[in-house]
Image (tube, rainbow, N blue to C red):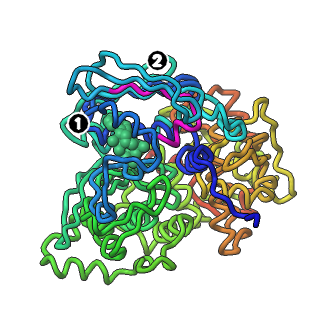
C-alpha cells in the first residue's frame, strides 16, 4: 500500500531546522559566537563582508576540536554539551541542541578549521549545502575558524528576504553587543568589509564593557545593582537613573545565567521597577544579569532561546521589580526594617501581578501600563518626575510639553483681545537673548518670547488645523526609507496605516516586519521621520485600545510638532523672527488653548523700575 506520510531526507531536515535558527546573517553570528564562548575563547574576531551576506568568519582561540569531533560537529544533534535529559536542567553552556553548525552548513558554503593542539595538527573541512566536499590536515594554532560564505545560496526564497548590507550589519552588531556585554573578560572585535567596527579589549567587569559599548558618558547615569534573595536568585548589573531614558525598549539588556533574553516577565518586572519614574513612552537603559539555579528556568522553549520559562515566575518578577525600586529610590527605604520595606512597597498600587501565563501582559500592554503609571498629573508626581532639574536637556522640552497638556493655564497664555490681530508683528524687536528668547518692546512694556515654545506652538496649531480639515500636507520622500521593526512596532504600524495616512505619513508593507516609509508630513522636514512614525504608531496602538483617539489626538500632534520645531539655543536672523511672529499672529490663541506653557512673558515699565528701586 502506498503511504501518504514519508520521512524526509536528512538534507531537507537540515534545511528545515536551519529555518528555525538561521534567519539572517546575524543568526549565524549569534550561533558561532556562542560556540566560541562555549569553547572558552578569550579572543574572538568576527569578520563580515556585505553585512554577512557574502562572508561571515569567526576566529577564536578556544579549545578547538580533534579530527573526529570536527566531523561530528557537522552532524545534526551532535553536541559535546549535554548527554542526558537531566543535563538540560543544569545547563552551563549557551549551546546544547547540537544543530547550529549542521543547520548553518546546510544553507551555505562552510569551511571549518580547527585544532585542539593535542598533536599540533589541525583539520580543515569544507562543505557545500551541508555536504562535506574536502578534508585536509594542516598545521594550525589552537582554536577554531568558521567561515560561512554565500548564506542561503541554495535557498533563493530566503535569500530574497535579506536586507541591505547596512541593515544586516546592524543586526549582527546588535548580536555582538549583547554577547559582549555578558562576557566582558573576552576580547571581541567586529570587522566589516575590512573596517574595524568594534574593538573591545578584555575588561575587568561589566561596567567597563558597558562604557565601551554604550559610551562612557552614560556611566554617570547608571546605578549599580547587586542583590540576592533567599531563593538564591542573584541580580547584578547597571540600571539607569530615571533621567537617562530612551524612546524604545532596545536599551534594556537582560541576561539569564549569561544568556541574553528578551522575556516578557523580566521586561515587565524591569518596567515595574521604574513605575512612576519615567515619562510615558520613555524607557530606561538597563544591563541586568540574573543568576538563577538552572533547574529553575527552562531555556529550551524557543528556537533562538530568547524566551525562557521560569518555574517560579512571580518570585522572579517581584524580586527584580523590588530590587530596581530599591536601587532607584534608596531614600524611601532608609530607616525601615527590611520586612516593612517590602510591605510598604507592595501596598502601593501596582501593575497586575504576573503569576500565570495568561496574566503576562503582552509587550504592548507593558508599555501601556507603565505609561499609565508614569503619566503626569499634578497630584501624582513623585520626587523624580517633579524635579525638572534632573531631566536631561533633550527630554525636558517634551516633558514640559506633555505636562502642559494637563496643566491648563489660560491666564498666562491668552492675549488681550485687541492685540490678537497682528500683535506679534507689531512688536519692536530688540534682539535675541541667550539664543533662546526674543526680546521685544510693546509700548512701554518689555516682552520676552520663548522662541522654542513659540515654534512648537505654531507647529502644533498648523498640524491641528490641517488635521481638522482633513489634510495634513505630506511630502514624498525621494528615497523611501525602509523601516525594519520589532514585532510590536510592526503590528502598530500595520494596524494604524489608515490613521497614519490621515496624519500625513505614507507607509507600505515591505515584507515581514518591514515597511517602506514613502511620504512624511511636510512640516517635519525629514527630521527623525522614521523614529517618529514608529512612535506615533505605537501611540495610536495604545490609544486605539482605549478607544479615545479623538481625545488623544492632541498628544499625537504634539509629538509630531515636537519633531518639527526649531530647538532652543539657535541664533535667529531678524527675518526668521519676523516670519515666526507672522505665524504666531495667524494662530487663534483664544479660541483654542488646551496647553499652556507660556510662549510670552511681559514686564511692565513699573515692574522693571521696581527692580531698580526707582519707585
Ligand atoms: P551546540 O553548540 O548546541 O553543541 P553546534 O552545532 O553549535 O551545537 O556545535 C556542535 C559541537 O561542535 C559543539 O557541541 C562543540 O563541541 C563543537 N564546536 C562548535 N563550535 C566550536 C568552536 N568554535 N570551538 C570548539 N568546539 C566547537
Ligand atoms: Mg552552538
Q: Is residue 563 visible?
A: no
- What residue sits 60% from the left and 45% below the top? 15
Q: Badges 1 and 2: C-beta atoms under 8 Å apart?
A: no
Q: In this view, does 269 lie above or below 563?
A: below
* Side (left or right) of 554 relative to 100: right
Mark 1 vs 2, N-terminal side: 1
Q: In this view, does 400 lie above or below 103?
A: below
Q: Could you say which quadrant of the image residue 121 lies in?
A: top left
Q: Is residue 145 above or below residue 422?
A: above
Which secondary structure, mark 2?
strand
Q: Could you say which quadrant of the image residue 424 lies in?
A: top right
Q: Is residue 234 visible?
A: yes
Q: Where residue 539 sits: x, y (%)?
A: 63, 60
How packed mark 2 is, by other alpha carbons closer than 10 Å (few <14, some 14-19, many 20 or more), is few
Residue 132 part of the magenta-drawn span: no
Nearest the viewer among 289 and 325 is 289
Which secondary structure, mark 1?
loop
Q: Could you say which quadrant of the image residue 209 lies in?
A: top left
Q: Mark 1 points at which residue?
A: 185
Q: Name the residue under label 2.
A: 195
Nearest the viewer among 329 and 420 is 329
Q: Where residue 288 sits: x, y (%)?
A: 31, 54
* Side (left or right) of 602 relative to 174: right
Residue 103 part of the magenta-drawn span: yes
Q: In which quarter of the image is the N terminus?
A: bottom right
How packed mark 1 is, by other alpha carbons closer than 10 Å (few <14, some 14-19, many 20 or more), is some
The magenta region covers 102-114
Amino acid at each position: 500500500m502506498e503511504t501518504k506520510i514519508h520521512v524526509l531526507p536528512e538534507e531537507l531536515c537540515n534545511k528545515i531546522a536551519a529555518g528555525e535558527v538561521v534567519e539572517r546573517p546575524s543568526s549565524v553570528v549569534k550561533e558561532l559566537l556562542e560556540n566560541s564562548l562555549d569553547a572558552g575563547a578569550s579572543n574572538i574576531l568576527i569578520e563580515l563582508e556585505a553585512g554577512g551576506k557574502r562572508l561571515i568568519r569567526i576566529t577564536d582561540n578556544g579549545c578547538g576540536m580533534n579530527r573526529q569531533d570536527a566531523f561530528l560537529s557537522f552532524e545534526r544533534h551532535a553536541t559535546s554539551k549535554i548527554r542526558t535529559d537531566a543535563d538540560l536542567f543544569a545547563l552551563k553552556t549557551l549551546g546544547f541542541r547540537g544543530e547550529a553548525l549542521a543547520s548553518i552548513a546546510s544553507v551555505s558554503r562552510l569551511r571549518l578549521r580547527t585544532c585542539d593542539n593535542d598533536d599540533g595538527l589541525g583539520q580543515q573541512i569544507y562543505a557545500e549545502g551541508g555536504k562535506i566536499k574536502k578534508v585536509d590536515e594542516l598545521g594550525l594554532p589552537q582554536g577554531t575558524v568558521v567561515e560561512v560564505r554565500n548564506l542561503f545560496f541554495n535557498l533563493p526564497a530566503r535569500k530574497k528576504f535579506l536586507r541591505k548590507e547596512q541593515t544586516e550589519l546592524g543586526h549582527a552588531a546588535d548580536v555582538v553587543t549583547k554577547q559582549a556585554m555578558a562576557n566582558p573578560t573576552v576580547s571581541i572585535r567586529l570587522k566589516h568589509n575590512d573596517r574595524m567596527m568594534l574593538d573591545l579589549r578584555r575588561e575587568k567587569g561589566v561596567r567597563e564593557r558597558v562604557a565601551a559599548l554604550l559610551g562612557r558618558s552614560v556611566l554617570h547615569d547608571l546605578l549599580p545593582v547587586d542583590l540576592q534573595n533567599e531563593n538564591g536568585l542573584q541580580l547584578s548589573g547597571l540600571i539607569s537613573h530615571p533621567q537617562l531614558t530612551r524612546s524604545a525598549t532596545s536599551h534594556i539588556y537582560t541576561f539569564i545565567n549569561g544568556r541574553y533574553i528578551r522575556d516578557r516577565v523580566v521586561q515587565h518586572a524591569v518596567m515595574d521597577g521604574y513605575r512612576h519614574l519615567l515619562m510615558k513612552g520613555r524607557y530606561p537603559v538597563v544591563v541586568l544579569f540574573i543568576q538563577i539555579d538552572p533547574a529553575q528556568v527552562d531555556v529550551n522553549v524557543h528556537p533562538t532561546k530568547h524566551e525562557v520559562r521560569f518555574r517560579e515566575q512571580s518570585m522572579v518578577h517581584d524580586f527584580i521589580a523590588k530590587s530596581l525600586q530599591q536601587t532607584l529610590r534608596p531614600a524611601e527605604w532608609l530607616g525601615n526594617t527590611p520586612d516593612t520595606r517590602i510591605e510598604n512597597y507592595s501596598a502601593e498600587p501596582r501593575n497586575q501581578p504576573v503569576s500565570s501565563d495568561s496574566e503576562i501582559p503582552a509587550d504592548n500592554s507593558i508599555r501601556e501600563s507603565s505609561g499609565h503609571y508614569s503619566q503626569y498629573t499634578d497630584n501624582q508626581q513623585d520626587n523624580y518626575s517633579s524635579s525638572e532639574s534632573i531631566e536631561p536637556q533633550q527630554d525636558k522640552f517634551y516633558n514640559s510639553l506633555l505636562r502642559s497638556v494637563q496643566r491648563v493655564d489660560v491666564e498666562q497664555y491668552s492675549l488681550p483681545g485687541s492685540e490678537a490681530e497682528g500683535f506679534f508683528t507689531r512688536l519692536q524687536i530688540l534682539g535675541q537673548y541667550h539664543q533662546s528668547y526674543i526680546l521685544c518692546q510693546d509700548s512701554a512694556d518689555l516682552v520676552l518670547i520663548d522662541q522654542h515654545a513659540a515654534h512648537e506652538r505654531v507647529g502644533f496649531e498648523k498640524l491641528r488645523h490641517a488635521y481638522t480639515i482633513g489634510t495634513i500636507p505630506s511630502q514624498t520622500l525621494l528615497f523611501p526609507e525602509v523601516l525594519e521593526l520589532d514585532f510590536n512596532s510592526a503590528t502598530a504600524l500595520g494596524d494604524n496605516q489608515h490613521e497614519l495616512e490621515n496624519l500625513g505619513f505614507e507607509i507600505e508593507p515591505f515584507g515581514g516586519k518591514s515597511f517602506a516609509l514613502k511620504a512624511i508630513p511636510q512640516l517635519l522636514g525629514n527630521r527623525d521621520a522614521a523614529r517618529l512614525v514608529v512612535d506615533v504608531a505605537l501611540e495610536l496602538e495604545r490609544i486605539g485600545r482605549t478607544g479615545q483617539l479623538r481625545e488623544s489626538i492632541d498628544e499625537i500632534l504634539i509629538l509630531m510638532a515636537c519633531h518639527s520645531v526649531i530647538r532652543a539655543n539657535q541664533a535667529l536672523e531678524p527675518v526668521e523672527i519676523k516670519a515666526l511672529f507672522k505665524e504666531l499672529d495667524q494662530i487663534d490663541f483664544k479660541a483654542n488653548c488646551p496647553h499652556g506653557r507660556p510662549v510670552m512673558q511681559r514686564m511692565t515699565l513699573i515692574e522693571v523700575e521696581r527692580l531698580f528701586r526707582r519707585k
